[in-house]
Image (cartoon, rainbow, N blue to C red):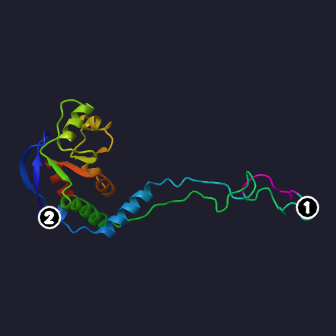
């Protein structure tokens, strides 16, 4: 079972805990991670892009000039793509980019992502994350104690003070155990989690 150090918000070591091998010590499956991240990004796409084809552009019912004798290139319609305000070749149309991913695959990907953070020593476990006021400088001070510039902060329950204090810091995102996802875990350099949130993650994904 992986053993990690528990810190306080001042950056001092206060304890050590053993993490669940099934969740934080699993084999990292890169193929599954790729599949889940690809699906997650694809599912964010709205797919509302649209342009007019030559069949949908107005006008162009008449041949602009006769076929021969003018010295100009032959033209059949001003709806053609080479004309200004003409139709678009292979015009994009609204479509659904959604990719379905098996529940078991999602679970394997989540365990792989969490385990990769432990293996790469990118996880920071805090005994608690309580700050006096919802001020950016309070959170910036805590991050400075760990020399962190880009991190995902995982909370057990909604904490408006921490969320507001973090919202103006570039490269920092807060999330809850219930909304944790593979893309966010991999996107950020550091994975900051409280010891209580660790237990909750183990309960959910064990």
- Residue 4, image x, y percentages: 11, 55
Q: Main secondary structure of the magenta part?
A: loop
Q: What range is drawn magenta here?
A: 56-64
Question: Label 2 belongs to which residue?
Answer: 21
- Image-based side of 167 in relation to 6, left or right: right
- Magenta stretch containing residue 60, yes or no? yes
- The image quadrant of residue 61 is bottom right
Q: Secondary structure at mark 2?
A: helix
Question: Label 1 belongs to which residue?
Answer: 66
- Image-based side of 56 in relation to 122, left or right: right
Q: Residues within 10 Å of mark 1 (few under 14, many from 20)?
A: few
Could you say which is closer to the camera, residue 7 or residue 200? Answer: 7
Locate the N terminus and report the quarter of the image it occupies: bottom left
- Magenta stretch containing residue 189, yes or no? no
- Image-based side of 71 in relation to 187, left or right: right
- Residue 185, image x, y percentages: 28, 55
Q: Secondary structure at mark 1?
A: loop
Against 80, is 146 above or below?
A: above
Q: Are marks 2 and 1 in contact (CB under 8 Å)?
A: no
- Image-based side of 6 in relation to 148, left or right: left
Instruction: Name the residue at 37% across, 66% down.
Output: 35
């Amino acid at each position: 079972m992986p053993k990690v150090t528990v810190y306080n918000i001042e950056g001092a070591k206060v304890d050590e805990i053993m993490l669940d091998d099934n969740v934080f010590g699993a084999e990292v499956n890169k193929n599954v991670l790729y599949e889940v991240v690809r699906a997650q990004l694809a599912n964010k796409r709205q797919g509302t892009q649209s342009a007019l084809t030559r069949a949908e552009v107005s006008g162009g019912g008449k041949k602009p000039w006769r076929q021969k004798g003018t010295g100009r290139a032959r033209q059949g319609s001003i709806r053609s793509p080479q004309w200004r305000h003409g139709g678009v070749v292979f015009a994009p149309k609204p479509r659904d980019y959604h990719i379905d991913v098996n529940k078991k695959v999602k679970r394997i990907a989540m365990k792989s992502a969490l385990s990769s953070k432990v293996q790469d020593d990118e996880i920071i476990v805090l005994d608690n994350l309580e700050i006096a006021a919802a001020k950016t400088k309070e959170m910036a001070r805590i991050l400075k104690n760990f020399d962190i510039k880009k991190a995902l902060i995982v909370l057990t329950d909604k904490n408006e003070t921490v969320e507001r204090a973090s919202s103006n810091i570039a490269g920092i995102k807060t999330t809850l155990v219930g909304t944790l996802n593979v893309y966010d875990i991999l996107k950020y350099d550091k994975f900051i989690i409280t010891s209580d949130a660790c237990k909750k993650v183990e309960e959910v994904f064990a």
